[in-house]
Amino acid sequence: MLKSIQTSLLILTLAGSGEVAAQSSNTQAKANNMELDVTGLKQALLGDWESIAPEVRPSAAKNADGTLKPFYLKRAFKYLPSDRFELEIVNSADPYSAVPLARIRIGGHMLWRGAHPIAPGAQKVDFVADETYEVTPLAQGFADVLNKVAAVGYAPWDVGAPQSIFGKTFAPFGLAEATNFMEYDLVYLRGDLLFWGARNIDGRGFDTEQNRPTNLQIPLIRK
């Protein structure tokens, strides 16, 4: 009887070891596949991307009736080797980009944080502006506003004249001195369409992991 029990325990132990080994092997295979997927995604992402048409986002600013003000923009994005990126945003006063207000240029690095559940192949990505952050007023009204709310530490704001806000306090964007701007976002590539995360409908930014987007934004198209 004892010998039979010992034999049974040995069989169970060996079977359990086999299951653990199989699970470990499967986990490692998935990790390897994920690494290959991200490597392939990075390779496919290299190059220039741009907005298909003017876009709109909910902003954090509110109208008098409490509704969120729209933020109209067009994007131009470049993904470079070593996970570097460059992003240009032109903000406009109207839905058709007929009245541009400001040009924003950001440069930095993308940090890859693993799979995002919104779609197969989607990845969580943090965009960190650790190289450049520049603002250019494109309308006199916007320059006048900046001269009131962002005068300290800057030259007078003039239309068409860019100024670096990198590493500086910049109240209009909520930037603090010596702090790199960062957003918790996502990336999903489908052919020649590049999707990021859709803005939160209540105007919250992507400033924490909890605020990372859960859905897809209107895509950029390969330039």
Image (spheres, rainbow, N blue to C red):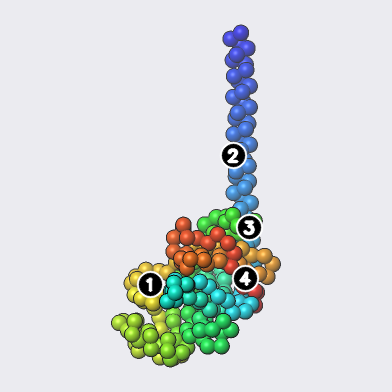
**2 or 4: tag closer to the N-terminus:** 2
Q: Looking at the image, do the residues carrying marks 3 and 2 touch, with CB atoms under 8 Å apart?
A: no
State which quarter of the image contains the C terminus. bottom right
Local packing at callout 2 (Cα closer than 10 Å; few below 14, some 14-19, many 20+) is few
The residue pinned by badge 3 equals 119
Q: Position of residue 29 (x, y in %)?
A: 63, 46
**2 or 1: tag closer to the N-terminus:** 2
Residue 4 shown left or right of residue 163 in the figure? right
Identify the amino acid type marked 2.
Ser
Identify the amino acid type marked 4.
Pro
Q: Position of residue 78 (x, y in %)?
A: 57, 74
Local packing at callout 4 (Cα closer than 10 Å; few below 14, some 14-19, many 20+) is many
State which quarter of the image contains the N terminus. top right
Q: Position of residue 64 (x, y in %)?
A: 42, 76
As drawn, the label of residue 203 is: none
Q: Looking at the image, do the residues carrying marks 3 and 1 touch, with CB atoms under 8 Å apart?
A: no
What residue appears at the point 34 percent right and 71 percent down from the top-left corner? 176
Q: CA distance from mark 3 to mark 1?
A: 32 Å
In this view, the mark in front (3 or 2): 3
Q: Quadrant of residue 35?
A: bottom right
The residue pinned by badge 4 equals 219
Looking at this rendering, what residue extends furthest in the left direction?
A: 152
Question: Which element carries disc 1, helix, strand or loop?
Answer: loop
Identify the amino acid type marked 3.
Ala
Q: Quadrant of residue 192?
A: bottom right
The residue pinned by badge 1 equals 174
Q: Quadrant of residue 132?
A: bottom left
**3 or 1: tag closer to the N-terminus:** 3
**1 or 4: tag closer to the N-terminus:** 1
Q: CA distance from mark 2 to mark 1?
A: 46 Å
Q: CA distance from mark 1 to mark 4?
A: 26 Å
